[in-house]
Image (cartoon, helix red, strand yellow):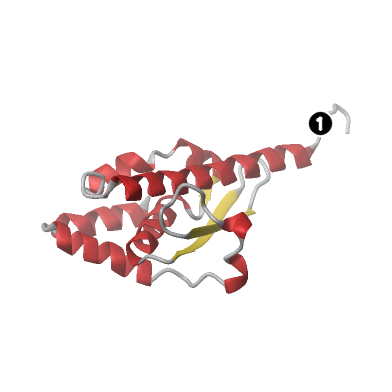
Amino acid sequence: MSAIADLLADFEILDEWEDRYRHVIDLGRELEPLPEADHAPENKVKGCASQVWITSEASGPAEDPVLTFRGDSDALIVKGLIAIAFMIYSGKPAREILATDAGEILGRLGLAGHLTQQRSNGFASMIQRIKSDAGAALQASSSAAGPDIPGR
C-alpha cells in the first residue's frame, strides 16, 4: 500500500479541492501511454461517460496471479482517476484486488464527495472491470492447474 500511503500524504497537504483536482490531472498525465492497438472495443470500459480503455496482464504464482494494468481515457480528470485506480490495484495479487475497497480509499482522499455522479459511476465501472479481470485471472489459473489427483 506504499503508493496509496504516498497518495494519501500528498492529498493531506492539499487543502483546497481545486489543488486536489489539479493533482489528479497531473497523475493522469504521468500514466504510461497505452498503445493505440489497445484502444480496442474489447478493452473499453462500459459505464463511463468518457472513453476509457483498460488492459490487464497476469503473472506470478498460478494460485494467486499478480495483475498489472494499463489504461487510457480521452478526458484528463478520468486519466487521473485511472492512475489512482492503478495505484490501488496494479501489481497486486488477484485475491488482494478482490478484497480491496477502492471507494473507501477514494473517501479517505476526499474525492468521493467532489466527483460528479457520472465520474463516480465511471470510477465504479473501472473498479468493476479491474475486479472482473482479477476474478478471471484466478479462475484461469485454477482451471489451468487441472484436477487435484493423488499420486500424480
Q: Is residue 13 left or right of residue 8?
A: left
Q: Residue 145 at x, y = what percent?
A: 77, 39
Outermost residue to the right: 151
- Which of these two is toward me, 119 or 150? 119
Q: Is residue 33 left or right of residue 62?
A: left
Residue type, label 1: Pro
Q: Which residue sits at x=43%, y=51%?
A: 48
Residue 3 appears in the rendering: yes
Q: Which residue sits at x=35%, y=62%?
A: 80
- What secondary structure is marked by label 1? loop
Q: Residue 69 at x, y = what percent?
A: 53, 58
Q: Residue 40 at x, y = what percent?
A: 61, 63
Outermost residue to the top: 150
Residue 56 appears in the rendering: no
Outermost residue to the front: 49
- Determine the image quadrant of residue 100: top left
Q: Which residue sits at x=77%, y=42%?
A: 144
Q: Residue 43 at x, y = what percent?
A: 58, 57
Q: Which residue is mark 1?
A: 147
Q: Which residue sits at x=57%, y=66%?
A: 39
